[in-house]
Image (cartoon, grey):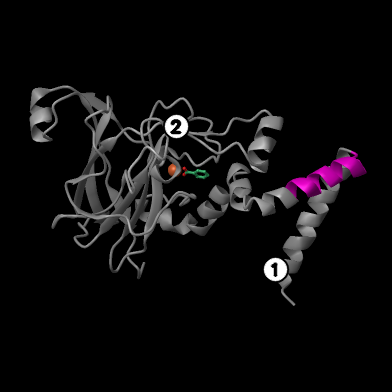
Amino acid sequence: MNQRLSEITEKITRSLQEVIREYEVTEEEWMQAIQFLTQVGIKDEFILLSDVLGISVLVNNLTHSHDHEDHATEYNVVGPLYRENAPLLKTPAKLCSIEESDQPLVMSGQIVSVDGKPIQNAIVDVWQANEKGDYENEDPNQKDYNLRGRIEVDEDGKYQFTSVVPGGYEIGKGGPVGELLKRIGRHAWRPGHIHFKIEAEGYKPLTTMLFIPNDPWIDSDAISAVKDSLILNLKKTDSPSDKEKYSLDKAFFICEYDFKLIANNQ
Ligand code: BEZ
Ligand code: FE
């Protein structure tokens, strides 16, 4: 017998019964709840339900609670939009065409150990939505693997990429989870963010996401994933020297972020 499973089951059962007693839930309401969960299963939305209830982020936080010691970069959930085998790119990389964009972004930084040593063999796997908040695999107007790439850092552990400032992402509203959010008066928006999965031999892989400051949804993320240490410091520049340095011919946003990884033996 599994003692831990037995205790958790007992506790969930008691909590659920307490809510049902407090609200005097009727048979009709309980059948609706069961039908809702059945639909969640049929539409494969259990992870999404866990996301919007804040449980995915909570479990991720608990799993990595010790990994933040020594000021290593905070973890975050991978989310449903990760794709393996993104194009392998050398730094400085280009994640999309910025010709049409009025908010190009140049992001750069360094991958270091918690004691500040550059990690030369790191691969920075990055994926994000476009300015409208659309991911390439959900948008027929974008090229395959647009705004995705696995960037090889240079000999100082540094990376740089050009992309665009991602817009807020609205979680699909067509299924049972979207319907629930509507019925309880909750929006389904996530603030603009960029995902990262960073791997290097000898270090624990880091999965996280960085957020666009001043996004309208930054204080009410539908999956409660925002952490202060993961909010970018974004600046707009129109200076001729910056444009020359990054070979851009219009104003753009710029930000730097260093990622601190924990060694395997720590
Ligand atoms: C996202 O990272 O974009 C995401 C995460 C959870 C649910 C839906 C989207
Ligand atoms: Fe995302």
Vertically, is 108 above or below 131? below
Vertically, is 262 above or below 77? below
Q: Can residue 25 be seen in this view?
A: no
Q: Nearer the viewer, residue 226 or 189?
A: 189
Amino acid bearing label 2: Gly
Magenta region: 24-37
- Residue 31 belongs to magenta span: yes
Q: In which quarter of the image is the N terminus?
A: bottom right
Q: Can residue 220 be seen in this view?
A: yes
Q: Which of 30 and 8 is in front in this view?
A: 30
Residue 206 appears at what percent x and percent y?
37, 56
The secondary structure type at the circle numbered 1 is: helix
Check residue 252 in the rendering and tell me which mark sits there, or answer none.
none
Residue located 23% across and 33% down the image: 98
Examine the residues drawn in magenta and state their main secondary structure: helix
Judged left or right of residue 112, residue 63 is: right
Sooner in the amino-acid sequence: mark 2 or mark 1: 1
* Residue, disc 2: 168
Judged left or right of residue 66, residue 40 is: right
* Residue, disc 1: 4
Amino acid bearing label 1: Arg
- Furthest toward the bottom, the residue is 1
Q: In which quarter of the image is residue 166?
A: top left
- Residue 181 belongs to magenta span: no
